[in-house]
Image: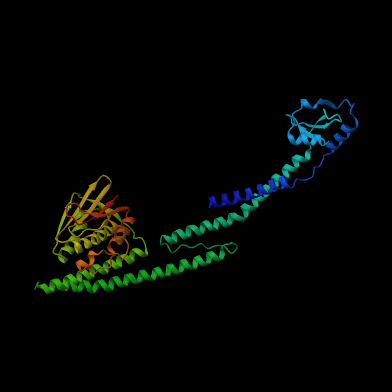
């Protein structure tokens, strides 16, 4: 806003200065003589032998081209010396002698005119400040409220006064923010209701199947389908929740096994793949819910595309805590890695594995890493020849 004000003020100053210069250059005001100048002209014209008149050869005087032209035209010119004293000069009839009279004090009206000019331009500058100040203040207020809206804070309001030039725009903005806030609240309530209504019967069905003693292939197949459905619902709900608002993070120290084992156990019951864990840490400082969501989404992708095994490694490096998940699946082509982090994105290998997901996992991981100040990267594993996902918690 300050830059905008300076730009406006500078533009006005340049325009006014240019207009004044053009008027003075191409439309000069007719010469006006002060009382002293008119008297000096009379004395120089009538009393050549007056002792108060100094006669000097013209060749001994250096004058500018404009003053020289005025002298040759028979005019009386006025010149200030180093002490700001005023002298009047006129060319004698022989056109070789310069007649001079003075010194005189500077006319008082010139200082007065300068003061008037200063007051005029100062009042103009003050008028610009008075007019643009409230406008720039309201624009800055609108900018801050817009920034809050872009960060999903839909409670932002501007509340311009009735005298504001932006009153109609502010009222429209406030109505929009209120509508977004109400919509956000409705969606949040819907997500909470869906989360309970969907996951509760899924959990009951899963527990009922696990309680069955007969561990045949049919039971195992149904259990796999239920767990797959549970993962899809959790993925949808997580994505919808993250789209609504930024989660509240509770970062503290946890035992790595407390965070890793529940998720690993869940996928081991879902898939026959070998999941190997290498953990070098005794404690990790993270937000528990975010960490487990990250692990579940990355491990879910690895389970769906791995052939025989998955490797999870948690270690401490120079820049922070590093979580790496590798698999021996088909890997990810380099030109597709960026697009896979967008919602609803899939690779061609999805159709080969029969995976029926919607492609939200990596976009959830990307958003969670952004909010947890973590760095997420995706490349190909060196040892298992499949995909490798790395998260650096700083």
Q: What colour scheme governs how the chains and residues are painted in the rendered image of this protein?
A: rainbow
Q: In this view, does 182 lie to the left or right of 214?
A: right
Q: Where is residue 103 in the image (x, y as percent from the top left)?
A: 80, 29
Residue at horizontal 38 percent and vertical 71 percent from the top: 186
Relative to residue 65, is residue 10 drawn left or right? left
Which of the two residues, 308 or 261, is positioned nearer the viewer here? 308
Q: Nearer the viewer, residue 368 or 190?
A: 368
Q: Where is residue 154 in the image (x, y as percent from the top left)?
A: 43, 64
Q: How many marks?
A: 0
Residue at 25% in and 49% down: 321
Please name the residue shown 57% across and 49% down the image.
6
| Quadrant assignment, res 238 | bottom left
Residue 124: horizontal and vertical position, in percent? 67, 50
Decide which of 197, 276 is in the foreground and name it: 276
Residue 262 visible within the image: no
The residue under the point 54% across, 58% down is 138
Q: Is residue 180 visible?
A: yes
Residue 78, percent from left and from top: 79, 34
State left or right for residue 307 relative to residue 182.
left
Residue 65 image-quadrant placement: top right
Of 349 and 81, nearer the camera is 349
């Amino acid at each position: 806003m300050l830059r905008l004000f300076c730009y406006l003020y500078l533009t006005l100053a340049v325009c006014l200065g240019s207009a004044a210069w053009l008027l003075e250059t191409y439309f000069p005001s007719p010469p006006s003589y002060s009382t002293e100048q008119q008297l000096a002209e009379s004395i120089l014209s009538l009393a050549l032998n007056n002792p108060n008149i100094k006669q000097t050869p013209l060749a001994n005087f250096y004058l500018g081209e404009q003053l020289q032209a005025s002298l040759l035209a028979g005019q009386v010119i006025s010149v200030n010396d180093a002490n700001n004293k005023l002298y009047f000069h006129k060319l004698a009839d022989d056109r070789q002698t310069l007649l001079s009279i003075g010194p005189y004090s500077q006319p008082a009206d010139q200082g007065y005119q300068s003061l008037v000019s200063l007051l005029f331009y100062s009042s103009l500058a003050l008028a610009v400040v008075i007019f643009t100040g409230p406008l720039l203040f309201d624009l800055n207020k609108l900018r801050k409220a817009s920034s809050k809206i872009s960060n999903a804070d839909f409670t932002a309001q501007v509340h311009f006064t009735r005298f504001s030039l932006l009153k109609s725009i502010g009222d429209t903005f406030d109505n929009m923010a209120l509508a977004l806030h109400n919509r956000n609240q409705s969606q949040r309530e819907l997500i909470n209701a869906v989360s309970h209504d969907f996951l509760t019967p899924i959990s009951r069905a899963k527990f009922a199947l696990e309680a069955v003693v007969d561990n045949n292939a049919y039971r195992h197949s149904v259990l796999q389908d239920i767990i797959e459905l549970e993962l899809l619902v959790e993925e949808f709900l997580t994505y919808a929740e993250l789209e609504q608002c930024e989660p509240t993070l509770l970062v503290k120290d946890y035992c790595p096994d407390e965070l890793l084992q529940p998720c690993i156990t869940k996928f081991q019951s879902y898939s026959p793949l070998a999941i190997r864990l290498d953990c070098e840490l005794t404690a990790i400082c993270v937000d528990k819910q975010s960490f487990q969501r990250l692990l579940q989404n990355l491990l879910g992708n690895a389970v769906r595309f791995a052939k025989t095994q998955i490797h999870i490694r948690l270690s401490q490096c120079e820049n922070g805590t590093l979580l790496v998940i590798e698999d021996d699946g088909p890997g990810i082509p380099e030109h597709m890695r960026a697009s896979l982090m967008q919602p609803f994105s899939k690779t061609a290998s999805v159709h080969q594995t029969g995976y029926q997901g919607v492609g939200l996992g990596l976009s959830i991981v990307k958003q969670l890493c952004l909010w947890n100040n973590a760095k997420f990267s995706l490349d190909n594993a060196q040892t298992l020849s499949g995909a490798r996902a790395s998260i650096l918690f700083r």
